[in-house]
Amino acid sequence: MKPAVLVYVNSNDEKETRRLLQAIKAKQEQIEELTMAMEHLKTEVDLFQHRYDAHVGRYYVELDKVELETKEYRLRLQLYREKVSAEEIEARVASCFKVNRARVTSYECEKEEQPKLEEKVLPKEEAKHLQTLYRKLAKRYHPDKTVDAEEQHRRKQLMPLINRAYQEQDIQTLARLNLGEIDVAMQREEAIVERPAQLQAELRNLNRATNELRLEINRLKAGRTYQLKEQVENAKEGGTDLLAALAKRLERKVKASRGQLARLINMWHRAKTS
């Protein structure tokens, strides 16, 4: 006669808790992947924006400036033909193009020096929460706390993101990465079966966070800068440099506009001395 075999059967609550813990772990990993994807996407967009500004943006600024001066001199000549006094002419030109002049001047200032971002001062409670989140995440994701090569690589990708979020006081990113952290007391066998409702609530938070991340990624991809970046990269694969071509067209347009402006300035000077 075979000896009796003792079989331990989990209760339904315990099985559900195990399932929820697995689902939470999977969602945590998904949030990590989506957060890294969004960080990479933002970096790509920022790099492309700098490249665009360097190759093309400066021509748009110059074109705006030349076209504004052209309008100003046309108005001067028109008012001169209407026998308006020189003093009144300058006053009316300044009044008519005040907004345009302010815009062009602000563009030029931005081009010459990048404004320093003012450090945001968080309220005491928020600052404390930020520091707590950072310490927890830095401890959890420190690469030296694992010997698994793949896990170390993943953590080395996450830690710069965590450091950046802390430096920029990005509580939202840190809070997302902290979701699904189950406290030690909850992992005890006697406590696990009592808290499926709390696990379900945490899983809902994780689902909400993944949806928000997907929406943010989609918004970035639908933005003008990302769309232009895609066009430029697709054209490059076909052997066409769209930014260089656009820069050349704008350069020609700026040159033509400058020539027109020079003629108007000459007409104005001749009119004043006649």
Image: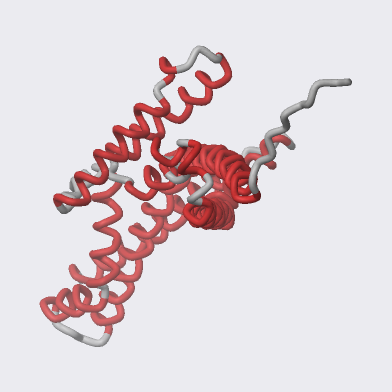
Q: Residue at x 25, y 46 (%)?
A: 129
**Quarter in which the N terminus is drawn:** top right
Q: Residue at x 33, y 73 (%)?
A: 74
From the top left corner, tell me how far across and down residue 125 is, in percent.
18, 51
- For the image, the number of numbered tags is 0
Q: Is residue 224 among what the camera can see?
A: no
Query: Is 203 located above or below residue 2 in the figure?
Result: below
From the top left corner, tell me how far across and down residue 91 is, in percent.
15, 77
**Quarter in which the C terminus is drawn:** bottom left
From the top left corner, tell me how far across and down residue 193 is, in percent.
53, 46
Q: Residue at x 43, y 48 (%)?
A: 57
From the top left corner, tell me how far across and down residue 79 is, in percent.
25, 82
Q: Colour mode?
A: secondary structure
* Nearer to us in this view, 179 or 3: 3
* Nearer to us in this view, 48 or 146: 146
| In this rendering, position of residue 7 left or right of residue 73 | right
